[in-house]
Image (tube, rainbow, N blue to C red):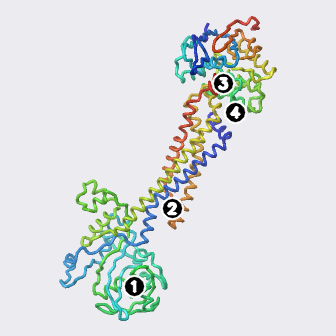
Amino acid sequence: MSLLELKNISKIYGDLHALDNVSLNIEKGEWIAIMGPSGSGKSTMMNIIGCLDRPSTGEVIFDGKDISKESRRRLTELHRDKIGLVFQQFHLINYLNAVENVMVAQYYHSMPDEKEALAALERVGLKDRAKHLPSQLSGGEQQRVCIARALINSPELILADEPTGNLDEANENIVLGIFRQLHKEGTSLIVVTHDPEVGEEAQRIVRLDHGKITSDRKNEGFKG
Amino acid sequence: MFLRMVCGTFYRQWKKMLMIALTVALGASIATAMLNVMLGVGDKINEELKTYGSNITVVPQSESVISKLYELDEDVRYDYLKEESVNELLTIFWANNIVDFAPETDTTVTLDGNEVRLIGSWFNHHLEFIKKGTTYQRDTGLVNLRSWWDIKSGKWLDEQELNGTDYCMVGETLANEKKLSAGDTIRVKGEHGTKELEIVGIFESGDDEDKCIFTTVTAVQELTDTSGLIKKIEVSAITSPDDELAVKAAKNPSLLTGDEYDLWYCTAYVSSICFQIQEAVPEAAASAVRQIADSEGKILEKTELLMSLITLMSLIGATLGISNLVTSGVMERSQELALLKAVGAKNGQITRLVLTETILTAVVGAVAGYFMGYAFAQIIGQTVFNSSIEMNGMVAFIVAVLIVLVTLVGSIPAIRLVLRLRPSEVLHGGH
């Protein structure tokens, strides 16, 4: 069953075609890695999938509905309700502690609930670090807080932009372990990465270059 | 969570918030000081100008009318008013704007073989009378109307303290010429008799009055056999600056429409006060000492304009300062604000967050500025007018409204920046 479908998407900045007539279908519960070199259009595709931006041309079908012409306000509501974002730079608010950073996403979604936020932190193994400020957490821990924040509103899709880009190997494994667990629980995952090892964890690997999809294959080595 | 985020901003950007508070405090203090001085300056300037004498004189309307009115003999050639007509000044609509007044009558007397002008007036007269069941009272006289007199020796003639009426004050030029000093007694010969007057004080006025003798009204009336009559009344009144309506009314009040007449009558124009004095004392003609009345109006108008401009400039300055500070604050926090958008915050919610932080800071600054402004107003009051400036409750309200407006207008560029902020550009670094 299709969760998201990109139909002939292009994103044009002046003379630059950041995405050039791209089509992609993502099934519910699927784990996809989007790979490619810098400037290949990965982040642009992530912004469009994450409802943070609109394509210049083409259609974006989310849950059976074309959202490519929706207003920014509607797109905000959509990514707030359906999508959890994980960033390479974590983007935690530095004056809020770990649990408060998770609760921020609750506050703008519905109502802050500390118990739920603590449960989300427990899920990523950080319940005992709930009252620590980001400056008191390691990079891996900050990324796990970021994942807990992405999970707090039970999104249909987790969209991760280079989630292990700033992590050492041990923390990378922890984060990938969390992704595996989420996938098992049925959450759809799209991971934008240029790291082949991270890409090989996904069920399906899509390669982008110069704004076009150059390959789209199932990962035979996927451990499920 | 909202409060936690607001507090977080105060904690993290305290230097910037302090600068915003100081900017607002400066603007609020100048606005408070200027508005307080401006609202009080009318009275202060009028008080100041009143020290330079009367601005209205009341004289008999015409000789023939007066002769008929007082049933004087045909050969009496003087113009007089009844002394008791002075009372009527306290019964007119603008009585409270009349700050001082004094009757005046004069004659030429002989002192040591020389002719000298003897002027009778009130010095610190206590006037009290009952009319239609209402008691009117006022202490008034030359002590206030000639406040610039420099008493060279002796003291002011104190009508309420001295017994009798045969006392006088002598101008310095005359005193030097006749070698007179306070405590001496002089003998003056008038048309209808001779009087011995004790000199209470020697004064310097800086004009022709230095060659005159000032005594009580009664003393002059006795020397001229004009009991109960005076020649004119000097009036010092607080007036509003003349405008087109006042000019039109001054030409002929009967040309005004009903509404114009009511407005003119109920405004303290010098012409409407004169008109009302004439209504109360029909045999008198009241006229403005135009030079002083005009000066008061112009000085008041220009001072208010200057203060308005200073207030406006300070508020514009505060607006620009707030604009720069809030905008740079938002730019510094662009990642944080973009993240809030990325987790679902709407533009309105982020705008509310930024405005709450800014307005809370502005409130702190405004309160501090209000009290600083109070202090500035007192400094201005003491330095310029030698008196304190009363705090006007309306000023607090006006300053509060102005500061809210300044803060909101100053925040507009920052809010536009917030609205233009795209998480896709800030969080991922573009395409």
- Residue A58, image x, y percentages: 55, 13
Label 1 Cα neighbours within 10 Å, binned few <14 / some 14-19 / many ≥20: many
Could you tell me how far apart the alpha carbons at marks 3 and 2 are, in whole angstroms?
59 Å
Query: In front: A206, or B69?
Result: A206
Label 4 Cα neighbours within 10 Å, binned few <14 / some 14-19 / many ≥20: many
Could you tell me how far apart the alpha carbons at marks 3 and 4 are, in whole angstroms?
22 Å
Q: Do the residues indicated by labels 3 and 4 lie within the same chain of the protein?
A: no
Q: Tag on residue B428?
A: 3
Q: Do the residues indicated by labels 1 and 3 lie within the same chain of the protein?
A: yes
Query: In front: B98, or A112?
Result: B98
**Image: A149 above or below B214:** above
Q: Tag on residue B211?
A: 1
Local SS, label 3: helix
**Image: A100 above or below B25:** above
**Quadrant of the image containing the C terminus of chain B:** top right
Could you tell me how far apart the alpha carbons at marks 2 and 1 are, in whole angstroms?
39 Å
Label 3 Cα neighbours within 10 Å, binned few <14 / some 14-19 / many ≥20: some
Could you tell me how far apart the alpha carbons at marks 1 and 3 are, in whole angstroms?
94 Å
Q: Look at discs 2 and 1 and give the one toward the viewer.
A: 1
Q: Look at discs 3 and 2 and give the one toward the viewer.
A: 3
Q: In screen coordinates, is B364 left or right of A151?
A: left
**Quadrant of the image containing the N terminus of chain B:** top right
Q: In screen coordinates, is A107 left or right of B111?
A: right
Q: Which residue is mark 2?
A: B389
Q: Chain of mark 3?
A: B
Q: Amino acid at mark 4?
A: Leu
Q: In screen coordinates, is A169 left or right of A108?
A: right
Label 2 Cα neighbours within 10 Å, binned few <14 / some 14-19 / many ≥20: many
